[in-house]
């Protein structure tokens, strides 16, 4: 991502233009000089004992050659690092560090003109990752000659060789970078925001692959990719839209930019923000595509970022450290250059009320004074991602924030189970939405109507006839429903599925059968119908009953292999209903505190996360007698805030009333780790 941002400057005015050079090292690991590695380590300050150990590991390297399956010769190597050795990458990086420092020294040469960089930001002339090296410089004769001289010197002292045929350079062109390649792999979305044309191309290829091909012709797409791209419980098939994935990764870029002081974030601040705050900035023509999307999405992301104050190094006006949003939103007079930090209003870890009343919004001063700071000098303030319980960022929660949602429905969730193959569940998904190639459906494409091929008395070949109320389907459902105490009276596929899924389960095995059995029945009814229609096999009740029983047996035998299952349905369902859960009981009781010590038990709760929060607690003495109890609301926040504020209130009450020996007991493991 940093390389992209620097390359975005390639068209900026510069003496001799700008140029990017990508180096390819020939046999990088195999050519490493042992003597050079030891000299580099000695120069960097490594001890002689450690260098000697490394030398012995590197030099103890012997080879033999296998010819026609037999070993021949046994000779000693004179250079190179062993592939697969965990020490080898570290030693190789030490060698590349020499090249890195040599390139950095070029800035001290008056004849060297560097790549165009923002004044005040990092002046970068190269990036290295293992044996990949990218050099940024001006395309002047003197600069390029200095680069070539530096590379030649490095080749001589390190025994490395630069493959000049496979190395490349890039100079300004009139072609936009976004339109050069239309086949960007999905994994690159973490660093690149592909244009819509590329996303549409990937989506089109994925959709064609999903629905399949008939010879050289695409099969009919029975549902759009937008319809499929929802979680199971919302009526989709569990895939995600590429647009939502890209936006979630763009949210991650903003999170990293705001919370980490990396070289990439430093470069972006120098390039686009200067002294202004990034929250107040807007995208302008000519700026990079990555920055454009970051500016576009920041209003979505910022409400989900808060800061835990330790030392007070966050910006008072522009960072949401109180949980009420940025203060700059409450005061139109604040300009984007006001970079006062929180510690400016602190005095010995406590709020300076006089300063606050002079500068802070008046309606927020009471909340600021009530905000408890765990003052720790030298410890940087910590970013908290509100949607996760741990406060750590995750792309999954970012995806939940940016995606379009539908109402959840239990019937959508019941279709899918980890022990049921996708193709079987997907068939039921299509049947519930009348998206199967039945004869009735095909007539809408201009074909003549044809009756079903599965029943003795052929009927209309539609979804409900094939799966529910046809003679063949009725017999199959009655055969499998009767042992469960349910009788077949339904006329629609949704109703027959609900009759299974609505039954009360007696144990986990019974729950699995009630969910998966109707899906398996539908699958075999459809297979029987297709086999009869296309003259593969005649419709057979005996065969279908056998196949359904076999599939159910394989299902429960896979999930519960430690039980000996019968192979007939009626015997199987009897054993399933008799299964009992292994229940273990632990006695849990409240323990009294030692004498002269009070025990405080607290708990917090949230209606949603985040949402309305509150907490309660009870304080008791060594006899178990009540000293104090409370139950209070805390406004809006996360469940972790509720778990934290409840004991904070209880401890504060104890200290105010002179109780200093307190034993705190909470049920939040995360809070215990924090403390």
Image: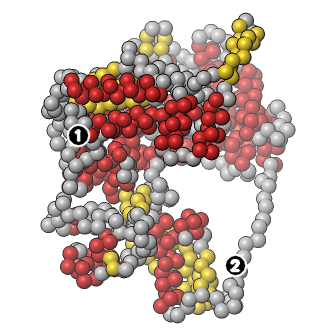
Residue located beneath label 1 in the image: 117
What crowding class fits label 1: few (fewer than 14 Cα within 10 Å), some (14-19), or many (20 or more)?
many
**Residue nearest the observer in this picture, 208 or 154:** 154
Labelled pair 2, 1 in contact (Cβ < 8 Å): no
Q: Nearer the viewer, residue 353 or 124?
A: 124
The C terminus - image quarter? bottom right
Badge 2: residue crowd in 10 Å (few <14, some 14–19, many ≥20):
few
Residue at the image point whose x is 14% and y is 33% from the top: 13
Q: In this view of the protein, can residue 621 be seen by the observer?
A: yes
**Callout 1 secondary element:** loop
Q: Which residue is mark 2?
A: 590
Q: Disc 2 to disc 1, how far (Cα)?
A: 65 Å
Decide: is 532 above or below 496: above
Figure colour scheme: secondary structure
**How far from the left and from the top, in percent, is residue 243?**
36, 36
Q: For this rendering, which residue is in front, 370 or 660?
A: 660
Expressed as whole percent of the image width and height from the top left, the position of residue 347 reads: 33, 79
Residue found at x 29% / y 67%: 341
- On screen, residue 222 above or below 42: above
Q: Nearer the viewer, residue 401 or 91?
A: 91
Can residue 241 be seen here? The reply is: no
Question: Which residue is located at x 24 percent, y 79 percent?
Answer: 355
Q: Position of residue 273 (x, y in %)?
A: 22, 50
* Residue 188 sits above or below residue 616 on the image: above
């Amino acid at each position: 991502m940093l390389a992209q941002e620097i390359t975005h400057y390639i068209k900026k005015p510069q003496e001799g233009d700008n140029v990017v050079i990508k180096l390819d090292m020939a046999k990088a690991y195999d050519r490493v000089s042992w003597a050079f590695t030891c000299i580099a380590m000695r120069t960097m300050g490594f001890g002689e004992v450690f260098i000697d150990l490394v030398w012995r590991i590197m030099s103890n390297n012997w080879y033999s050659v296998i010819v026609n399956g037999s070993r021949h010769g046994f000779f000693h190597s004179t250079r190179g690092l062993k592939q697969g050795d965990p020490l080898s990458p570290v030693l190789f990086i030490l060698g590349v560090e020499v090249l890195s420092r040599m390139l950095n020294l070029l800035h001290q040469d008056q004849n060297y003109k560097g790549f165009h960089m923002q004044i005040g930001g990092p002046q970068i002339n190269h990036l290295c990752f293992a044996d990949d090296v990218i050099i940024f410089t001006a395309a002047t004769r003197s600069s390029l000659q200095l680069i070539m001289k530096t590379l030649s010197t490095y080749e001589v002292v390190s025994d490395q060789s630069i493959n000049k045929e496979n190395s490349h350079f890039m100079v300004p062109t009139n072609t936009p970078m976004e339109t050069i390649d239309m086949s960007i792999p999905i994994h690159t979305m973490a660093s690149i925001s592909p244009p819509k044309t590329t996303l549409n191309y990937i989506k089109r290829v994925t959709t064609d692959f999903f629905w399949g091909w008939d010879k050289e012709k695409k099969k009919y797409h029975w549902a759009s990719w937008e319809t499929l791209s929802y979680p199971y419980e919302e009526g989709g098939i569990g895939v995600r839209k590429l647009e939502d994935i890209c936006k979630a990764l763009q949210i991650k870029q903003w999170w990293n930019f705001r919370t980490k002081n990396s070289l990439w974030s430093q470069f972006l601040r120098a390039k686009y923000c200067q002294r202004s705050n990034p929250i107040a900035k807007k995208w302008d023509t000519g700026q990079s595509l990555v920055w454009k999307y970051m500016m576009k999405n920041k209003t979505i992301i910022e409400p989900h970022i808060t800061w835990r104050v330790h030392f007070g190094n966050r910006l008072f006006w522009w960072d949401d450290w109180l949980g009420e949003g940025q203060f700059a939103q409450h005061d139109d007079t604040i300009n984007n250059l006001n970079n006062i930090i929180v510690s400016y209003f602190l005095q010995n870890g406590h709020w300076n009320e006089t300063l606050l009343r002079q500068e802070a919004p008046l309606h927020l001063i009471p909340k600021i004074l009530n905000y408890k700071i765990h003052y720790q000098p030298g410890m940087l303030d910590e970013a908290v991602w509100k949607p996760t319980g741990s406060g750590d960022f995750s792309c999954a929660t970012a995806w939940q924030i940016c995606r379009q949602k539908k109402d959840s429905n239990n019937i959508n969730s019941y279709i899918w189970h980890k022990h049921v193959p996708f193709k079987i569940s997907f068939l039921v998904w299509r049947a519930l939405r009348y998206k199967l190639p039945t004869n009735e459906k095909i007539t809408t494409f201009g074909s003549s109507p044809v009756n079903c091929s599965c029943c003795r008395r052929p009927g209309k070949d539609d979804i409900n006839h094939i799966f529910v109320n046809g003679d063949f389907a009725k017999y199959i459902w009655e055969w499998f429903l009767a042992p469960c105490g349910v009788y077949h009276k339904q006329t629609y596929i949704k109703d027959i599925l609900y009759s299974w899924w609505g039954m009360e389960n007696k144990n986990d095995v019974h729950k699995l059968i009630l969910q998966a059995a109707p899906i398996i029945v539908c699958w075999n009814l459809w297979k029987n119908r297709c086999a009869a229609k296309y003259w593969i096999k005649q419709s057979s009740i005996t065969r279908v009953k056998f196949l359904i029983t076999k599939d159910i047996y394989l299902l429960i035998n896979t999930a519960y292999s430690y039980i000996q299952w019968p192979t007939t349905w009626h015997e199987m369902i009897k054993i399933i209903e008799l299964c009992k859960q292994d229940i273990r009981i632990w006695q849990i009781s409240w323990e009294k505190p030692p004498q002269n010590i009070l025990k405080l038990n607290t708990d917090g709760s949230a209606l949603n996360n985040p949402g309305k929060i509150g907490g309660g607690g009870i304080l008791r003495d060594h006899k178990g007698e009540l000293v104090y109890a409370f139950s209070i609301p805390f406004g809006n926040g996360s469940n972790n805030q509720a778990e934290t504020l409840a004991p904070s209130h209880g401890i504060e009450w104890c200290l105010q009333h002179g109780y200093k020996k307190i034993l705190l007991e909470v049920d939040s493991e995360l809070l215990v780790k924090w403390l």
